[in-house]
Image (cartoon, rainbow, N blue to C red):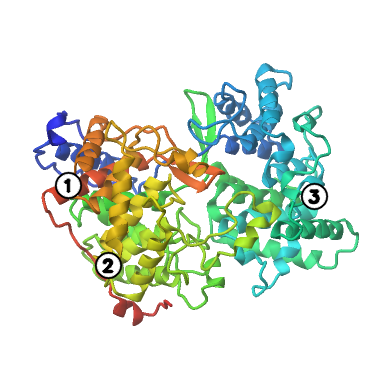
Amino acid sequence: MTPEAQLRVEAPRRAGSQHGAAVSPRRVAESPLEEAIARSVDWFLSSQKQEGYWWGELEADTTLESDYILYLHILGELQSEKTEKLAKYIRDRQLPDGGWNIFYGGPSELNATVKAWVALRLAGDSASAPHLQRAKQRIHQLGGLESTNSYVRFYLAMVDAIDWSYVPAIPPELMLLPEWFPVNLFEMSSWTRGIVIPLAIVYAHKPGWRLPEGVTVDELLTSPGARPHSLAWDRRVVSWKNFFVALDRAIKLYDSSPWKPFRKISLGRARKWMLERLERSEGLGTIYPAMMNSIFALFAECGDTNDPLLARETGFLARYEIEDEDAETLRVQPCISPLWDTAIAMVSLEEAGLDPAHPALLSAARWLVQNQILGPGDWQVKNKKAAPGGWAFEFRNDFYPDVDDTAFVLMALGRVADPEPAKLRASIRRGLAWLLSMQNADGGWGAFDHENNLQFLNNVPFADHNAMLDPSTADVTARALECLGQMGWDAKHSVVDRARKFLLKDQCADGSWFGRWGVNYIYGTSGVLRALEAAGPNSHSQPACERAATWLRSVQNTDGGFGESILSYYDEKLKAKAKSTASQTAWALIGLLAVASPDDPAVGRAVSWLLAHQNDDGTWDEAEFTGTGFPQVFYLKYHLYRNSFPLYALARYDNLRKEKRRFIGVQVSAQEIEHANGYWG
């Protein structure tokens, strides 16, 4: 039985478009599949913003709300009404065992629990209150305060809750290390730089913003006086960890000396670095921890909340707040994702058959072109010959375009039929040249940086956020390769061939691929299969693709859907073993359709699951987190994933089943790039 025959649905009323153009008249739906696609298209058209973009909430764990309460305390705003709303949001998410988790359905996690405990104490909750007693007990069971990561301890040292000896040294003298030296700022990932450099300014000042009277964290230690694990010696005498622990102790000796000859110049460079990036962004890196840390750095230096720059930056951070009046809570986003959301929505709508010249697509395309980054950025330090031309994740983050966003934007723009194509083509050509310039020597792509892969730096004491580097990954490489395939690049071209070889080498033994930026092996496998399909036939790729498709079939749930828990980042045995979700079922379906026939039974069951779980308004529900920030440390829930990827998957299935040829769009050859003003290596 076909998926269409298994489900009958009613057509909902259509909402008007917010972007100004009327919703296109519906074609008559001949099946439940077509009706489901049409409902989803209508929902997207009605939810487009007036300026042309799409933007969904980006959700994370309670560490953000906990840090925000600490931030309000430091700025002298703890009595704000925001504090109780943040505290209620945190209290509402405490687990029965007393702890807090870092993803939906996950177990208690030490760092999140310590942060929540401190935040609720700041909010006025008594240490003897039952919920905090349970939290303290859970903290002890998880290893105590001494087992927390560097950044938890750094924040506690800032407020004199613990001694600075508990914190890895982050001296501003890092700014003096030359680019040719193996350990320098630009060998760290972009997000690490954004987090660490403001903290280096704070470390130099050691401001001592004290906790309120009676609030301490001593009771969270299991062994008072014990050295934090990240600062303890390795059992091996000779190891990179021991080298960096010894270096940390040497730096602290220097820092304790009254004579620090390099402190003034290094602080000046750190300040200059930070101010340059604040000038061309809406907050440092436009990511929550870097933004908050930059505010701490500014406040440590000026001590005045009325300072114009400090006020501007606190205003940017306040835009990440989301107030739920019904629940009387306040939550905070870790970042904002309008360019990413817009590109994915456009590609999904284009696959669904929306006219390439539809006003919604033209409006979105022009908005994307306006937001192309044409100025310098950190990526140029190790990629000096390339011209700018990428796109960022957020509204304005000029120093940090990224490969994943740029590739998706290019695919979206490439299928728009702009009535004035010259400007669009020039934008695509410049963006593609930048994308090509970011390919690493191993054939893959990282996210934000070029050749950022010195593994020994993972032993630096403040590298315990598990994202010190930005090396090539399968999912970002797949996106770039898919983009090149859509642009019509020959499968034999050296850039395509090197990317393909990287992906084949990176495949797991069972046929899957690891997902760095999405959860997890389903995400990685789907992306690679789609990329290899788009890149064109290759005899070496076919066996790998068949193994991957076999793996996907083997992990399909009995209900026809696919699901994977974040726990698969901790235990490979849990690969793709979880309740079915809309986004992960869509990813698996996209991957299967790159290899299998639309008549494949696994394909039909996945389609049926998506049809059966669509809401009347064209959306899908999904509580789970299926996005990844830092594996094993920080996870995300993209609120549009559950709608955009199912639309794309169902539309692609429909097109393949009917043997419909989608609009091909702009083709930009290697020769055109080679003769353009941009450079690529």
Under circle 3, the secondary element is loop
As shown in the figure, which amino acid type bears the numbered disc 2?
Met
CA neighbours of label 1 inside 10 A, class few (<14), some (14 to 19), many (20+): many
Residue 234 rendering spot, x and y as whole percentages: 74, 52
Q: Mark 1 and mark 2: span between their CA atoms?
A: 25 Å
Q: For the view shown, which residue lies furthest in the bottom direction?
A: 675
Question: Depth check: 185 or 220 in front?
Answer: 220
Sooner in the amino-acid sequence: mark 1 or mark 2: 2
Q: Is residue 678 visible?
A: yes
Category of crowding for the residue at label 3, using alpha-carbon neighbours closer than 10 angstroms: few (below 14), some (14–19), many (at least 20): some
Q: How many marks?
A: 3
| Coordinates of residue 276 in the picture (x, y in percent) | 61, 64
Quadrant position of the C terminus in the picture: bottom left
Please state if 629 lies on the left or on the right of 657 as rendered: right
Please, is residue 245 above or below residue 315 in the view?
below
Tell me what residue is drawn at x 30 percent, y 80 percent: 671
Q: CA distance from mark 2 to mark 3?
A: 52 Å
Q: Secondary structure at mark 1?
A: loop
Residue that carries the numbered disc 2 in the rendered image: 487
Q: Nearer the viewer, mark 2 or mark 3?
A: 2
- Write the residue at 78% across / 31% down: 216
Q: Is disc 2 placed on a helix, strand or loop?
A: loop
Above or below, 274 relative to 128 = below
* Residue tagged 3: 206
Closest to the camera, between mark 3 and mark 1, is 1
Badge 1 is on which residue? 598
Seen in the image, is 432 located left or right of residue 383? left
